[in-house]
Amino acid sequence: MTLVEIAGAGLAELTCARLLADRGHRVRLPPPRPSAPTVGADPRPLLLTGPTLELVGSLWGGGLIEDGWPITHRHARWGAGPSPAPFPQPGRVMDGVLLAARMRERLGAGDRSQEPPEWTVTATSGEQPVHERPVHEQPVHEQTGRRRLLAGIAPLRRRRDQDTARLDCTALGWLHLTPLGRGDCLVQAMVPGPAQAPAELLAGLLAESAFDALLRRPPRTAVALAAAPRVHLAPAVPPTLGSGGLLVVGAGALRYDPLSGTGTAQALRTAILAAAVIDAAATGRPATALCAHYTDRLRAAFREHLHTCLRLYTTAFGTGPWQDEIDATRAALRTGRQPLRALD
């Protein structure tokens, strides 16, 4: 069967490896990571709810996330409206690094041959940061906007707040609290442009929100991460004579605005689609057409996500600092690359 190189150990890459191995393909894997978090390693908290929990369970079975911190409710205030009551929404908060390590353990040693692979699956986009990119080099993504996600850890004031994920808005952006257990929570905020002093900006946003009373103090440190939606322009390259094919999965292929809460599920769906492309190519279906279909599916998902972003951000931030982000989204929907044609 087909030999596939899995060039990373992210959730999407490892899920693609599992699906391919289950279908009889040979997968070459990266070395396993320790299943226990390394001392000093940065955690990557993921809030998994509803369809994402079901998707992880259907793809991997049990035993991966059951010990994650349980969330029972969600409380969301969007825009300037009144604050509604919390509503039930069961979920789990899981360290993404630990989750990936557990997935990797389940895959075993993988193929150890030295043969050249027929396909490579990776979540690395291959794009250099803007400040390192030569002037003449074109980006490999279509990106909409410049917004940044601020993130830091802070202690909750009351233990009873540890079972509820919360969303609130200020004039400058939205904030989200994700309980992590042991009295701490992940504090995130989305702002419509670069942030030079993320900890100070995050503290200011908290002071303007209803969350200030829920925390003992704001995060002492924070990071500012690029968070504008983007899609890879060429996420699927068919094999050629002497060269294997390439499929980009996960956030390297398609990055959602984290407001949607579906980023993890979408990353896993790219893995499912990539595995289907490789499996279909192994049966003799034209790899070029399969790769075009993969690209079209991602573009269609990206445009649908932009429609959702436009509706939500126009509702909450129709004027003021978010106008450039809203205008960029409208322009992308008006002039962006359209999906080509679906594969029959």
Image (cartoon, rainbow, N blue to C red):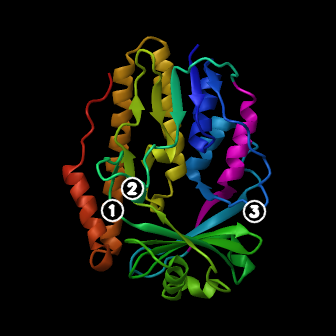
For the C terminus, the image quarter is top left
Q: Quadrant of residue 157?
A: bottom right
Q: Is residue 214 magenta?
A: no
For the point 48% across and 38% down, the residue is 270
Is 72 positioned to the left or the right of 339 in the image?
Answer: right
Q: Nearer the viewer, residue 18 or 66?
A: 18
Vertical side of 160 occupied by 228: above or below: above
Is the residue 339 above or below the residue 70 in the image? above
Relative height, residue 80 to residue 52 (above, below): below
* Residue neighbourhood size for the residue with mark 3, other residues' Cα within 10 Å, grouped as few (<14), some (14–19), many (≥20): few
Instruction: Quickly name the residue at label 2.
Output: 229
Gap between marks 3 and 2 measured at Cα: 30 Å
Task: Please report the residue visible at 33 percent of the width from the left and 62 percent of the height from the top.
Answer: 145
Work out whether 118 lies above or below 303.
Answer: above
Give the residues drawn in magenta, as a range. Answer: 86-110
Q: Horizontal and vertical percent for residue 311?
A: 31, 63
Q: Name the residue that disc number 3 marks.
A: 40
Using the image, tell me which numbered label, if any, was put on residue 145: 1
Dot 3 or dot 2, earlier in sequence = 3
